[in-house]
Image: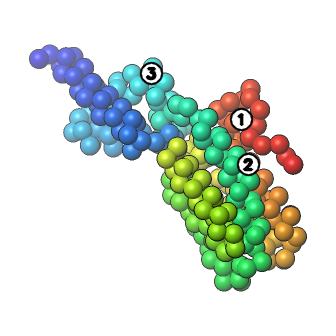
């Protein structure tokens, strides 16, 4: 077998290996494809892996972004967009309904998580950031006295986990804004702000992430939610 044929065979092996993981959502939308890591997994050089990723890019399954590299595309993001819209409304309401029951210790816990999120910004890991983001918001809405509201919020979080790896993979610049908004929400809760204000700020915080994604991925379309 010639070197060219061997390389082509390895690129097809890498192609099918990556494509299978995209199909099973082990590599979910936004997942960063690190050539060296994949090459190590498959015990081959990065050359056939690069060829495989170019083939997947031609099929629309992978996209290259300058200074980021290859990541799994958001093939059909309609369901994601609908879930983010729903979560904006549900989480805002649940946070407001929970606010008066939150203790000083709860606020301290949430602020500690947000501090960890700030620390991740220097060497940004979208997955780790998203996990901490979920932990932060869970603290704020976990004392909501409406069990149905909690069930709906948790269901949308779970659904988002199946639909994409991390929104912040697509809009990493949104992360720094997000942690600043977190602190603003905590201050409102600490100061006993009107529940309507807490609901509005929490809702707009979530919808701002969707807006950032829409501007990045669909600049010609309407944004996520009206600013009501």
Q: How many labels does the image show?
A: 3
Q: Badge 2 local density, few (<14 within 10 Å), some, or many (20+)?
A: many
As drawn, 5 above or below 128: above
Question: For the point 63% across and 59% down, which residue is it?
Answer: 153
CA distance separating discs 3 and 2: 31 Å
Q: Is the image coloured rainbow, by chain, by secondary structure, or in one colour? A: rainbow
Residue that numbered label 3 is attached to: 59
* Residue farthest toward the left in the current orientation of the protein: 1
As drawn, 91 above or below 56: below
Q: In this view, does 151 lie to the left or right of 97?
A: left
CA distance separating discs 1 and 3: 23 Å
Task: Mark 1 or mark 3: name the one nearer the start of the chain.
Answer: 3
Where is residue 23? Give x, y as percent. Answer: 39, 35
Task: Mark 3 or mark 2: name the one nearer the start of the chain.
Answer: 3
Where is residue 113? Give x, y as percent. Answer: 60, 70
Residue that numbered label 2 is attached to: 207
Q: Do the residues labelled 1 and 3 touch (CB within 8 Å)?
A: no
Where is residue 211? Give x, y as percent. Answer: 73, 42
Task: Mark 1 or mark 2: name the one nearer the start of the chain.
Answer: 2
Give the structural element (helix, strand or loop) at label 1.
helix
As drawn, 86 above or below 58: below
Quadrant in the picture for the N terminus: top left
Residue that numbered label 1 is attached to: 215
Q: Dividing the picture into quarters, in which one does residue 37 lie?
A: top left
Q: Is residue 20 left or right of residue 149?
A: left
């Amino acid at each position: 077998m010639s070197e060219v044929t061997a390389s082509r065979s390895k690129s097809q092996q890498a192609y099918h290996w990556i494509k299978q993981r995209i199909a099973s959502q082990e590599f979910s939308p936004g997942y960063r494809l690190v050539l060296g890591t994949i090459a190590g997994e498959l015990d081959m050089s990065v050359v056939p892996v690069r060829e495989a990723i170019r083939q997947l890019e031609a099929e629309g399954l992978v996209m290259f972004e300058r200074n980021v590299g290859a990541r799994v595309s958001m093939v059909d993001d309609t369901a994601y967009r609908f879930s983010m819209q729903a979560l904006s409304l549900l989480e805002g309401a649940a946070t407001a309904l929970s606010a008066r029951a939150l203790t000083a210790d709860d606020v301290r816990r949430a602020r500690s998580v947000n501090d960890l999120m700030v620390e991740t910004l220097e060497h940004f890991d979208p997955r780790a950031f998203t996990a901490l983001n979920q932990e932060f918001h869970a603290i704020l809405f976990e004392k909501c006295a409406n069990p149905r509201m909690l069930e709906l919020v948790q269901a949308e979080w779970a659904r988002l986990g199946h639909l994409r790896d991390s929104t912040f993979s697509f809009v990493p610049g949104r992360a720094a804004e997000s942690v600043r908004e977190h602190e603003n929400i905590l201050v409102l809760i600490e100061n006993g702000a009107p529940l309507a204000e807490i609901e509005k700020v929490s809702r707009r915080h979530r919808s701002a992430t969707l807006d950032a994604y829409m501007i990045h991925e669909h600049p010609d379309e309407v944004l996520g939610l009206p600013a009501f």
